[in-house]
Image (spheres, rainbow, N blue to C red):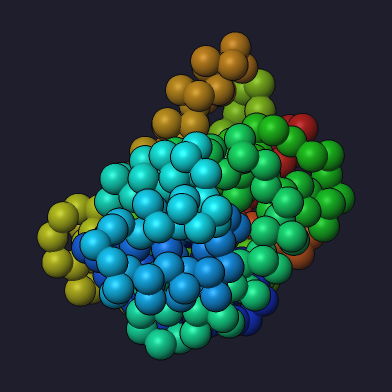
């Protein structure tokens, strides 16, 4: 998840485009993580120090970490932490961007420094991201959405958004990204599925995308090829929204806030999403751009 968090920072600052980012994420799981790049990403070493240790390795029979400790660039605790992260497998996004020539090591060093300064992530927060806690990504985004929508900040809405991104990653595409800068609905013609939630929390939820994305998401969820807008596609997409909201209802029950779900339905008569109380959760995935619109209301008629 730390790769997705850093990736969203790159997208937000227009340092890479979405196509480049997704291609990097597609190959990073199968690439061995080099300790020097990880040390630079964690802020333990500079690009020049990493280059120096790499050059020293050519002259002596020693591991990168051993040389870095000898030179005083790392201590034993830092090295143990880096080795633990390296053992998890899968290269950091920083390494992919360097390996593929998108940025030089020194350019990446400046980007990572700016990223860490902007986010001011504590060790606990970074460890949470390493564990895959998408809440660290979603909470500030949903808080901003609530401000724009003129509604109180809600922990339940942040949990709803976090669960949706996690479900997109789990069931549709493991490299799904929160598009923090996206403000527009997908291109016409739009396809939408609606489901109303009532009880301790009242929400009106829409899952919106264009037709090609609708078919691809339907096929991915159904584990089969779906090329046309037919009953099978409709059943698969409505089932995905119902699955997501059903998992959210379980979470709400665990918080002693029971909710009930109305059956999901396809919807061609969309409301004015610029009206009161709507927040948006835009996600870029391998199937296309998917938008969730959520209206938090005291009473939904």
Residues 146 and 47: in front is: 47
The residue lying at 66 percent from left, 21 percent from top is: 200
Residue 177: image location, x then y, percent: 48, 62
Say whether residue 211 is left or right of residue 218: right
Say whether residue 137 is left or right of residue 30: right
Residue 257, compared with residue 282, is above or below; it is above
Residues 10 and 251: in front is: 10
Say whether residue 64 is left or right of residue 14: left
User: Does residue 287 appear in this view?
Assistant: no
Residue 212: image location, x then y, percent: 33, 76
Residue 213: image location, x then y, percent: 36, 71
Picture quadrant where residue 114 is located: bottom right
Residues 167 and 28: in front is: 28
Residue 170, compared with residue 92, is above or below; it is above
- Quadrant for the C terminus, please: top right
The residue lying at 52 percent from left, 15 percent from top is: 254
Residue 245: image location, x then y, percent: 46, 37
Picture quadrant where residue 175 is located: bottom left
Count of numbered tags:
0
The residue lying at 62 percent from left, 39 percent from top is: 123
The residue lying at 83 percent from left, 44 percent from top is: 151
User: Does residue 45 appear in this view?
Assistant: yes
Residue 16, compared with residue 198, is above or below; it is below
Residues 217 and 19: in front is: 19
Residue 140, compared with residue 275, is above or below; it is above
Residue most extreme to the bottom: 101
Residue most extreme to the left: 224
């Amino acid at each position: 998840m730390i790769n997705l968090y850093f990736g969203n920072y790159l997208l937000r600052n227009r340092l890479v485009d979405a196509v480049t980012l997704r291609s990097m994420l597609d190959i990073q799981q199968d690439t061995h993580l080099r300790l020097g790049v990880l040390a630079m990403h964690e802020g333990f070493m500079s690009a020049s120090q990493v280059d120096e240790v790499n050059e020293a390795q050519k002259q002596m029979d020693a591991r990168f970490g051993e040389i870095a400790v000898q030179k005083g660039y790392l201590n034993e605790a830092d090295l143990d932490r880096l080795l633990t992260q390296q053992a998890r497998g899968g290269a950091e996004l920083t390494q992919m961007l360097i390996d593929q020539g998108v940025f030089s090591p020194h350019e990446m060093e400046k980007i990572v420094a700016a990223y860490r300064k902007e986010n001011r992530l504590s060790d606990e927060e970074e460890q949470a991201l390493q564990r895959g806690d998408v809440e660290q990504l979603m909470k500030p985004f949903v808080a901003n959405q609530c401000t724009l929508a003129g509604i109180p900040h809600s922990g339940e809405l942040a949990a709803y958004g976090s669960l949706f991104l996690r479900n997109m990653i789990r069931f549709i595409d493991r490299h799904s990204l929160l598009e923090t800068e996206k403000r527009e609905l997908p291109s016409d013609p739009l396809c939408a599925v609606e489901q109303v939630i009532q009880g301790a929390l009242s929400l009106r939820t829409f899952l919106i995308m264009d037709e090609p994305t609708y078919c691809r998401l339907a096929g991915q969820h159904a584990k089969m090829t779906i090329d046309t807008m037919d009953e099978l596609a409709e059943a698969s997409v409505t089932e995905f929204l119902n699955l997501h909201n059903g998992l959210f209802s379980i979470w709400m029950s665990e918080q002693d806030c029971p909710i009930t779900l109305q059956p999901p339905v396809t919807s061609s008569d969309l409301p004015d999403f610029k009206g009161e109380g709507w927040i948006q959760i835009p996600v870029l995935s391998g199937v296309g751009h998917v938008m969730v619109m959520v209206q938090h209301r005291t009473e939904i008629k």
